[in-house]
Amino acid sequence: MSEAHGHAPNHPYHLVSPSPWPLLGAFSAGTLAVGMVLFMHDVTPWLIPVGVALLLLTMFLWWRDVVREATYEKLHTPIVQLGLRYGMALFIASEVMFFAAFFWAFFNAALFPTEATGYQWPPVGIEPFDPFGVPFLNTLILLLSGCTVTWAHHELRKGNRRGTIQGLAITIALGILFTSLQAYEYGHAAFGFRDGIYPSVFYMATGFHGFHVIIGTCFLSVCLYRAWRGHFTPEHHFGFEAAAWYWHFVDVVWLFLFTFVYLWGS
C-alpha cells in the first residue's frame, strides 16, 4: 500500500501506487507514431492530432499526480528527491547524446566534403544565414533567459515569491521571443529541407533545439503557475530545479549550434 492511504511510512522511500498513465502514455505514443507513418505515406493525417491530444492528456494527468504527491501528500522526502535528481541528470545526459548525433553528421559532412557537396562546405549552391543577424540576437536572448531563470531560483531560495514569479515570467517571455525569431528565420531561409546534407542537418539540429525550447517554455510555465499557487518553498522545489536544469541545457546546446553550425559553418 502507498503511504498516501493513511499509514505512517517506516522508510524514507515513496512506493508509487498503481497508475494507468504509463499504459495510456504507451498507447498515445504508439498512436502518434502510426499516425506519422501514415501521414508520410500520404494515407491520412487525422491520426496525428489524436495521438498528440492523447499524449497531452497523459502528461497532464500523470504530472498532476506527481505534483499532488510532492505538494500535498509530502511524499517526496530528501531520499526521493535525490533519486529524482539522478533521474533528471540521466535524462539530460541522454539528450546530450541525442544532439551529439546531429553534430556528428554535421562535422562528418563539413570536415570531409564529398562530390555531392562540390568538395566544399557549405555545399555549392547553399547560401547560409548571416550568423550575426537573427542567430546572434537569439543567442543573446537565450543567454539572458539563463540569467533570469537563475535569478528566479535565487529569489525562490530566499523565500521571495514575487521575485520568483517575475524571473519566471521574464524567462518565459524570452523563450517565446526566441521561438518567434526562429520561426521568422525559417520563413526567410534561402534553402529547403530537401536541398542536400547541409539543410537536412541544419533543420534537424536547430529544429529539434527549437522544439526543446518550446518544451522548456511549457515546463517553466507550469512552474510559474505553481509558484503563483505557493507550491514551492525554499527547501522543497525540485520541480523548479528540474525546469532550470533543462533550460540551462537548452542554452548550452544553442551555444554549440551558434558556434559551429552558424558561425563556423558559414
Image (cartoon, rainbow, N blue to C red):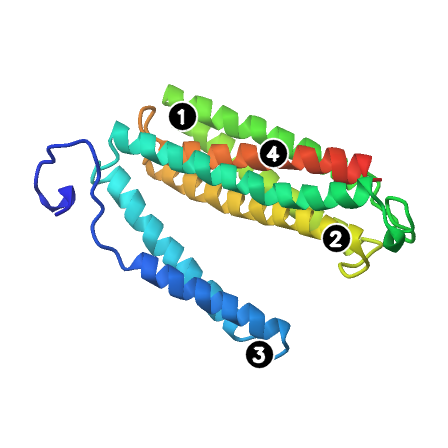
Determine crowd level at label 4: few under 14, some 14-19, many 20+ residues with C-alpha closer than 10 A: many
Marks 3, 2: nearer the viewer: 3
CB within 8 Å, label 1 to label 2? no
136 above or below 183? Answer: above
- What's the residue type where badge 4 is placed? Asp
| Residue 27 percent across, percent down from the top left | 39, 66
For marks 4 and 1, the one nearer the N-term is 1
| Residue 91 percent across, percent down from the top left | 46, 40
- What's the residue type where badge 2 is placed? Tyr
- What's the residue type where badge 1 is placed? Leu
CB within 8 Å, label 3 to label 2? no
The Cα atoms of the two marked residues, 4 and 1, are separated by: 21 Å
165 above or below 2? Answer: above
Residue 222 disc label: none
Residue 251 disc label: 4
Left or right of 71 on screen, residue 248: right
Task: Label 1, secondary structure: give it.
Answer: helix
| Residue 78 percent across, percent down from the top left | 27, 28
Task: Label 3, secondary structure: give it.
Answer: loop
